[in-house]
Image (tube, helix red, strand yellow):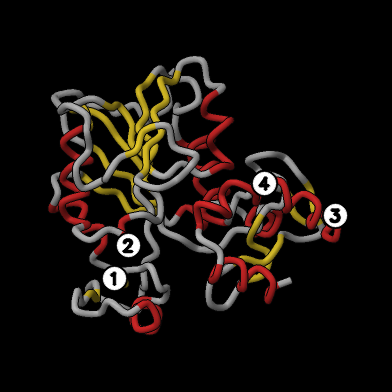
């Protein structure tokens, strides 16, 4: 299974995978029947999750039913347990929307949901994140996950997201971070896909983020909170939901208000 997934991810364009993968994985998931893990996004139970990864597919990663990966399951738990996202009226910009979230966010009655991406067939607005076609302060919430490592000028993209976020707004902006690096490694002279994979870990990555990723977001104007949310969960929950350690980067745009929409209402 790992070889099959690796071959598909490496040789089939992502826009084609996004169109059909949700039709294929539930069938493959029959081989994983069991009760060992549970996806908190869709509620499905399996013996374990499917493998996933471009170079060295990791086991217990992909939910066959909704396609949630470890980071998606972690983000869902954070939103559900630590924020008022599912109850609070908001205008959300979701960059490169993940299929596991798409239909579920569309069903939230209080959410004005805008999906955008340059290539994804799932997005309704075709958009270059470096030139966001919306006015200043347009969105209450912005989600942008595992996109900035693909962008030519990530700092410009960060500034654009800051611009279109309203004062007092917030967001989650995840990226793969190499915790062994103090500073981000990038070299625009490296253009060959094979060399990019060797240097940055994937052929369509333009940089390998280091521990300074949060500081780069701060330099765009955001207040940044780096949350190791897995540490707040029990070992039993981590195992049940198939999680792995990944920092949740919560960004906020300052306003005169003392509270943000992420905070749960106080009794």
Mark found first going from the N terminus, 4 or 3 = 4
Eyeballing the image, is 1 above or below 254? Answer: below
Q: Quadrant of the N terminus?
A: bottom right
For disc 4, the neighbor class at 10 Å (few under 14, some 14 to 19, many from 20) is some
In the displayed structure image, the side of residue 22 where residue 54 appears, left or right: left
Query: Does the image show residue 77?
Result: no
Measure the alpha-carbon separation of dots 1 and 2. 6 Å
Which mark sits nearer the N-terminus, 3 or 2? 3
List the residue tagged with mark 3.
30
> Disc 1, disc 2: CB below 8 Å?
yes
Quadrant of the frame with the C terminus: top left
Give the percent coordinates (x, y) of residue 186: 23, 74
Which of disc 1 and disc 3 is earlier in sequence? 3
Which type of secondary structure does the marked residue at label 3 adopt? Answer: helix
Q: Which residue position holds label 2?
A: 149
Tell me the number on the disc at residue 207.
1
Q: CA distance from mark 2 to mark 4?
A: 25 Å
Mark 4 / mark 1, whichever is N-terminal: 4
Front label number (4 vs 1):
4
Point 37% across, 37% down: residue: 116
At which x and y percent is residue 246?
46, 60
Q: Quadrant of residue 239?
A: bottom right
> Could you tell me which residue is drawn at 53 percent across and 35 percent down?
102
Q: Is residue 133 left or right of residue 196?
A: left
């Amino acid at each position: 299974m790992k070889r099959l997934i690796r071959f598909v991810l490496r040789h089939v364009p992502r826009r084609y995978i996004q169109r059909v993968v949700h039709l294929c994985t539930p069938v493959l998931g029959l081989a994983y029947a069991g009760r060992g893990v549970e996806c908190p996004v869709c509620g499905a139970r399996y013996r374990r999750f499917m493998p996933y990864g471009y170079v060295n597919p990791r086991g217990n990663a992909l939910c066959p039913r909704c396609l949630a990966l470890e980071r998606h399951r972690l983000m869902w738990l954070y939103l559900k347990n630590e924020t008022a996202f599912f109850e609070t009226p908001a205008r959300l910009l979701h960059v490169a929307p993940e299929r596991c979230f798409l239909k579920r966010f569309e069903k939230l009655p209080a959410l004005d949901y805008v999906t955008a991406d340059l290539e994804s067939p799932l997005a309704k607005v075709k958009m270059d994140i470096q030139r966001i076609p919306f006015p200043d302060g347009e969105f209450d919430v912005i989600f942008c996950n595992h996109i900035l490592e693909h962008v030519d000028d990530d700092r410009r993209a960060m500034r654009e997201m800051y611009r279109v976020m309203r004062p007092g707004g917030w967001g989650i902006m995840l990226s793969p971070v190499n915790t062994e690096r103090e500073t981000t490694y990038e070299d625009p002279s490296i253009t060959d896909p094979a060399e990019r994979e060797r240097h940055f870990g994937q052929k369509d990555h333009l940089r390998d983020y280091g521990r300074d990723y949060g500081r780069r977001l701060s330099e765009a104007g955001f207040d940044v909170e780096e949350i190791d949310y897995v540490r707040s969960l029990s070992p039993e929950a981590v195992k049940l939901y198939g999680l792995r350690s990944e920092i949740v980067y919560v960004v906020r745009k300052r306003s005169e208000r003392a509270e943000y929409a992420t905070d749960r209402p106080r009794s």
